[in-house]
Image: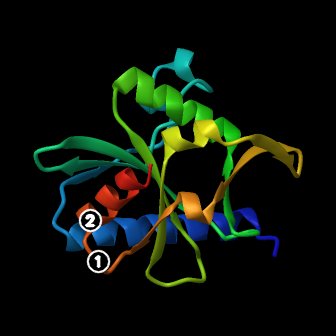
Amino acid sequence: MILTRIERRAQGQAAEDRFRAWLDRCRLPHIYVEQSPMTFPENLHGTIKRPDFLVGIPTIGTIAVDVKAKRIYDDAIIIDADEHRTLANFETYFNISVSFACFPPDEPHVCHLILNRNLAALPVRRAKGKAVVAVPLKSTHLADERRDFMAAVLGAIRLR
């Protein structure tokens, strides 16, 4: 199924809305990170990518989360290799762990949590002319957004 840019953007917004609602239900402090080019230094364009949310985890600290609407292909979630690289740079520059929260658009209440640093061990391959990383579902933490976010995060960390 090939989606238009507008349809992809709508799916991405719906995934971000689901994530925000999950955090709100769990009463966790969070900040949406505004994504316009003016919000970080010009010399870092193409070097870092900002995650979508910063989430305050009581007594632990802050984690960063990049939210995606992602379909499952051959029991894997496909992540752009350049996104992985630029989020890894964000982790290094800011000393904050980044996770992906991937919401399959056609699966209500399903979220796959993936630690960005775990992608470094996976091979990069070409798909449709782009460098990508195929993350096997067994390497993700399956979460239900109706449940506690903290439990899901701890489960994803233990998965390593």
Q: Are marks 1 and 2 in contact (CB under 8 Å)?
A: yes
Disc 1 on helix, strand or loop?
loop
Is 87 above or below relative to 15?
above
Q: Amino acid at mark 2?
A: Ala
Residue 147, label in figure: 1
Instruction: Please tell me the numbered disc located at residue 50.
Output: none
Residue at image location 50% in from the left, 38% down from the top? 117
In terms of depth relative to the viewer, which is nearer, 115 or 96? 115
Q: Residue at x 89, y 45 (%)?
A: 129
Element type at marker 2?
helix
Q: Is residue 107 visible?
A: yes
In this rendering, position of residue 75 left or right of residue 116: right
Between 22 and 156, the residue placed more toward the observer is 156
Scheme by which the image is coloured: rainbow
Q: Quadrant of residue 7?
A: bottom right
Find disc 2 in the rendering and name its residue.
151
**Residue 43 in the image, given as x and y percentages of width and height:** 55, 15
Observer-side mark, 1 or 2, equals 2
Residue closest to the far right: 129
Where in the figure is residue 57, as x and y percent of width and height? 19, 50
Q: Is residue 85 left or right of residue 115?
A: right
In the rendered image, residue 3, in percent from the top left (x then y), is placed at 76, 70
Q: How many marks?
A: 2
Give the residue displayed 38% in from the left and 66% down from the top.
Answer: 19
For the N terminus, which image quadrant?
Answer: bottom right
Residue 69 appears in the figure? no
The answer to whether 131 appears left or right of 140 in the picture is right
Q: Going by the image, does 91 lie left or right of 146?
A: right
Rendered residue at 39%/57% (across/down):
156
- Mark pair 1, 2: CA separation: 8 Å
- The 10 Å Cα crowd at callout 1, few under 14, some 14 to 19, many 20 or more, is few
Residue 144 lies, in percent from the top left, at: 39, 77
